[in-house]
C-alpha cells in the first residue's frame, strides 16, 4: 500500500515536471533560440544514458527472468525506432517542402503538425507510466529522458506553428495542449496493467524510440549552430550524469 502511494505521488510530480518542461521549451524557443543548442546537447547525452545504463540492463534482466526471446526484443527496438522515424518525417516532410517556397506557407499545416506532436507527447506520458510498471528505477529513468525530450517538444510545437504563419496566441494555446498531453498519458496508465511477458517488448520499443530522438533529432539540432568540442563534451556530460545516477540507484 505504501509503495503504491509513493509511486502514485511520484507519477503526479513527474507529470507536473513534464508539463513545466514543455512550457519552458516553448517559451525558450521564442526568447532564447541562440542558447538552445547547449541544452539540447546535454539532453541528448541524458537520453542516451537512460537507454544504455537503465533500459538495456533492465531488458537483459527481464529476458533472463522470463526466458523471453531476445530476437523479439530487438525487433521491438527496431519497430520503435522506425515508428517514430516515420511519424516524425510524416509530420515534417510537407513542412520542409513548404520551406522551399517562402510565401507558400499555410496555417493549417502548422496546426496539423502541432496536433501530431501533441499525440506524440501523450505517448511520452504513457512511456513514463509503463516504465513504473516495470520498476520505480526504470520509471524514473524514463521520466528523466521524457522530461528532457518534452523541452524540445515544446520548442517544435511553437516553431511549426509560427513558421507556418500562425499567430503567437494560437501557438501559446497549442503549447498548453502539448504540455497537458504527457500528463494525460501518465494518468491513462493508471487504468491498465501490461503483463510482465509484454513489458520487455515495451522496453525494447521504448529504447528504439529514445535512440531515435537522441541520435536523429536532438543531436543534429544541437550541432546545427555550434558543432564544436564543447557541444560534444556537453553530450558526454549528460551520459556521465545518468551513469552516476544509475550506479547510486
Image: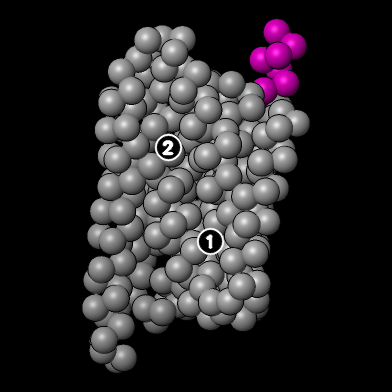
Furthest residue to the bottom? Answer: 103
Q: Nearer the viewer, residue 111 or 224?
A: 224
Tell me if residue 217 can be seen. Answer: yes
Type of colouring: one colour
Q: Residue at x 67, y 48 (%)?
A: 240
Q: Which mark is residue 197?
A: none
Does the stretch in magenta take in 7?
yes
In this picture, residue 159 sits left or right of residue 79: right
Q: Residue at x 65, y 64 (%)?
A: 233
Q: Nearer the viewer, residue 17 or 187?
A: 17
Q: Which residues are magenta?
A: 1-8
Does the stretch in magenta take in 133?
no
- Secondary structure beneath dot 1 equals helix
Q: Residue at x 55, y 48 (%)?
A: 47
Q: Nearer the viewer, residue 143 or 204?
A: 204
Q: What's the magenta bit mostly, secondary-structure-wise?
A: helix
Tell me if residue 189 can be seen. Answer: no
In the image, residue 97 lies at what x, y percent? Answer: 24, 78
Q: Is residue 50 above or below residue 1?
A: below
Q: Which mark is residue 206?
A: 2
3D distance between C-alphas at marks 1 and 2: 18 Å
Q: Is residue 175 above or below residue 169?
A: above
Q: Which mark is residue 152?
A: 1
Amino acid at each position: 500500500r505504501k509503495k503504491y502511494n509513493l509511486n502514485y505521488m511520484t507519477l503526479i510530480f513527474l507529470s507536473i515536471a513534464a508539463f513545466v518542461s514543455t512550457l519552458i521549451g516553448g517559451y525558450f524557443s521564442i526568447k532564447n533560440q541562440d542558447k538552445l543548442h547547449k541544452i539540447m546537447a546535454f539532453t541528448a547525452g541524458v537520453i542516451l544514458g537512460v537507454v544504455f545504463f537503465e533500459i538495456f540492463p533492465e531488458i537483459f534482466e527481464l529476458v533472463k527472468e522470463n526466458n523471453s526471446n531476445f530476437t523479439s526484443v530487438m525487433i521491438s527496438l527496431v519497430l520503435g525506432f522506425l515508428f517514430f522515424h516515420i511519424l516524425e518525417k510524416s509530420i515534417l516532410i510537407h513542412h520542409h517542402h513548404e520551406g522551399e517556397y517562402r510565401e507558400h506557407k499555410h496555417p493549417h499545416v502548422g496546426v496539423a503538425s502541432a496536433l501530431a506532436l501533441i499525440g506524440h507527447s501523450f505517448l511520452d506520458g504513457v512511456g513514463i507510466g509503463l516504465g513504473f510498471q516495470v520498476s520505480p528505477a526504470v520509471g524514473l529513468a524514463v521520466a528523466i529522458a521524457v522530461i528532457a525530450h518534452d523541452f524540445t517538444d515544446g520548442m517544435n510545437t511553437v516553431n511549426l506553428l509560427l513558421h507556418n504563419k500562425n499567430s503567437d496566441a494560437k501557438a501559446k494555446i497549442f503549447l498548453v495542449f502539448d504540455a497537458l498531453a504527457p500528463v494525460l498519458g501518465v494518468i491513462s496508465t493508471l487504468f491498465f496493467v501490461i503483463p510482465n511477458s509484454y513489458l520487455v517488448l515495451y522496453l525494447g520499443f521504448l529504447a528504439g524510440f529514445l535512440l531515435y530522438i537522441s541520435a536523429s533529432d536532438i543531436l543534429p539540432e544541437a550541432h546545427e549552430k555550434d558543432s564544436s568540442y564543447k557541444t560534444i563534451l556537453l553530450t558526454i556530460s549528460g551520459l556521465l550524469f545518468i551513469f552516476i545516477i544509475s550506479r547510486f540507484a
